[in-house]
Image (cartoon, coloured by chain):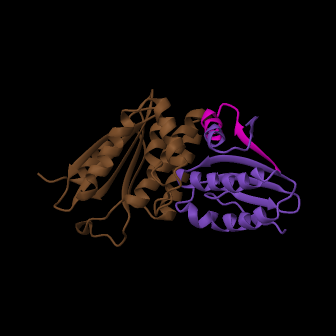
Amino acid sequence: MSFDLNQWYEEKIDEDAIFDYKGRIDDEDVTRILNSIERILKAKDESPKIFKKIFNVLIELVQNLHHHGEVPANLNVDYNKFGVLILRDEGMQYRISVGNFIKIEGLKLIRDRIDQINTLSSEETRNLYRIILNNEQFSEKGGGGLGMVEIARKSGNNMEYQFIDYNTDYLFLSIDVVI
Amino acid sequence: MNSLVLEGSPKTPSINFDGEKGAFLIEGRSIPENSLDFYKPVMEWLDSYVNEPQEETKVSIRLEYFNTSSSKCILDIFKKLETIFKRGKRVIINWHYEVDDEDMLEAGEDYQSIVKIPFNMVEEDE
């Protein structure tokens, strides 16, 4: 049974979902997504502290989709950055779910990275952030590997992830961050 | 020394570097997808300023949000200012953060742990 993206997406959208997006993640889409979520959270009158945490984590997650969201040929779309994002208000916490396709060879790198970050205490996360910040290396995308550390640090929680088989070249990676 | 003025946008901060007065301001949001492109002219301007700095350079950072793509560029700005500082000129960095925004205060402390110039942490009402 192969992975059905639409079914996966629909199952995520229940009454707790306050924002959902599936599609192209170009520069202007990143802007639109962030603007929409900012409007929704402001309308909910969320505390500035929580609002900022959510927004900081969202910026990194959406820009990750922009930089890494691959498009398998059989999606039949005319763009080359694809991603999914759902924001849920679960009462006591917010949950951000993101999903994107990755090439199979990228699996180990991403899994090891998330596993490593998930084992760290908040103090260790902060120290790792400072080390990477000062290592004078930029990735070609400019981030230099700080994004995942920042997500863990700002959310204060482990990232929950799942790699789902898609076809011979691609996996679907979903990441949940709870704030 | 001329000035560098860049207007802010929803994803990029306003930059106002007054070379005559030695007064620098970065304000707003710095969340561009590609921060290297945005900060390139800032770095180039600073390279010139470092060669003929004022006796005192006063820097105010008043950011609401910045992404990790910007964070290394901001560090690079501080490192250029550190060059002036190490040559005996006065450099003051005022790191502004909104009251209760512990994350932004911590971000200032992160830079302070790396950069030799003393930071003033300035708490502001919303």
Q: Residue at x 27, y 70 (%)?
A: A76
User: In the image, A106: left or right of A153?
Assistant: left
**What is the residue that sits farthest to the left in this orientation?**
A1
Image position, residue B22 (x, y; %): 84, 57
Q: Quadrant of the N terminus of chain B?
A: bottom right
Above or below residue B43? Residue B55 is above
Q: Residue at x 83, y 63 (%)?
A: B19
- Residue B95 among magenta residues: yes
Image position, residue B72 (x, y; %): 57, 53
**Residue A82 position by quadrant:** bottom left
The purple one among the chains is: B
- Colour of chain A, in one word, is brown
Q: Residue at x 72, y 42 (%)?
A: B95
Give the magenta range: B90-108
User: In the image, B92: left or right of B101?
Assistant: right
- Residue A175 among magenta residues: no
Above or below residue A122? Residue B21 is below
Q: Residue at x 46, y 55 (%)?
A: A63
- In front of the other: A105 or A1: A105
Let me know if residue A61 appears in the view: yes
Q: Quadrant of the C terminus of chain B?
A: top right
- In front of the other: A49 or A111: A111
**What is the residue that sits farthest to the front in this orientation?**
B87
